[in-house]
Amino acid sequence: MKLNKIMMVAAIAFGASSIAHAANQGQGVVKFEGSIIDAPCSINPDTVDQTVNLGQVSKIALKDGGQSTPKEFQILLENCEIEEGKQNVSLTFTGVKAASGNLAINGEAKGASILLSDTSGKPIKLGTATAAHKITEGKNILRFNAALQGDGKDVAVTPGNFTSVADFTMAYE
């Protein structure tokens, strides 16, 4: 009987120590998301949702409608298979418009907005399709610029942090 009690205590002790070793040593969740689209090209996941850092811009640079140095951003298309009538793509950027017609900013900073442009510097109007980009089989890079721009002569620029969001929609033609 005494031997059974010793064996039971030993079994409990070994069981408890194995439970202690099996304690949570980290865990998490891996979430997968995406969508299947009816288009000649896939959009590279790194460029579907992206952040463009416009840096720390002096309010003096924005005085009287001045602007920061443009920052390039790209939308990468991949696995493109060209179909008849779909050799070009245009994008329409949308978001909250500032009084200037540019993309409005939110936050502490005031008196400026974000100017979107093509690589030649031609401004892109929110809600209006860009010029068509010719696409080829395989991979394609669509390049654009963004710059912070002062909202004009009679508008005071207030320093502070800001954010903004522009959505884009693609149309193949």
Image: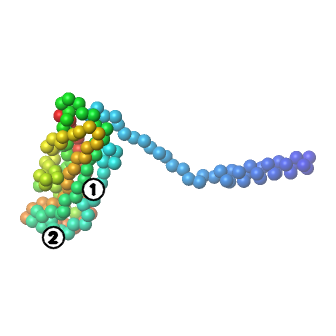
Q: Name the residue rendered at 13%, 54% in the picture.
A: 121
Q: Is residue 61 visible?
A: yes
Give, as a three-letter code, the residue at label 1. Answer: Val
Where is residue 80? Give x, y as percent.
Answer: 28, 37
The relative height of residue 27 versus residue 34 in the rendered view (above or below) is below
The residue that label 2 is drawn on is: 60
Tell which circle, 1 or 2, labels the residue nearer the N-terminal end.
Answer: 1
Where is residue 144? Give x, y as percent.
Answer: 20, 51
Q: Can residue 104 be seen in this view?
A: no
Q: Name the residue rendered at 14%, 43% in the picture.
A: 131
The relative height of residue 141 versus residue 67 in the rendered view (above or below) is above
CA distance separating discs 1 and 2: 22 Å
| The C terminus sits in image quarter | top left
Q: Is residue 4 left or right of residue 156?
A: right
The residue that label 1 is drawn on is: 52
Outermost residue toward the front in this view: 137
**Quadrant location of residue 147?**
bottom left
Between 118 and 2, the one nearer to me in the picture: 118
Q: Element under label 2?
A: loop
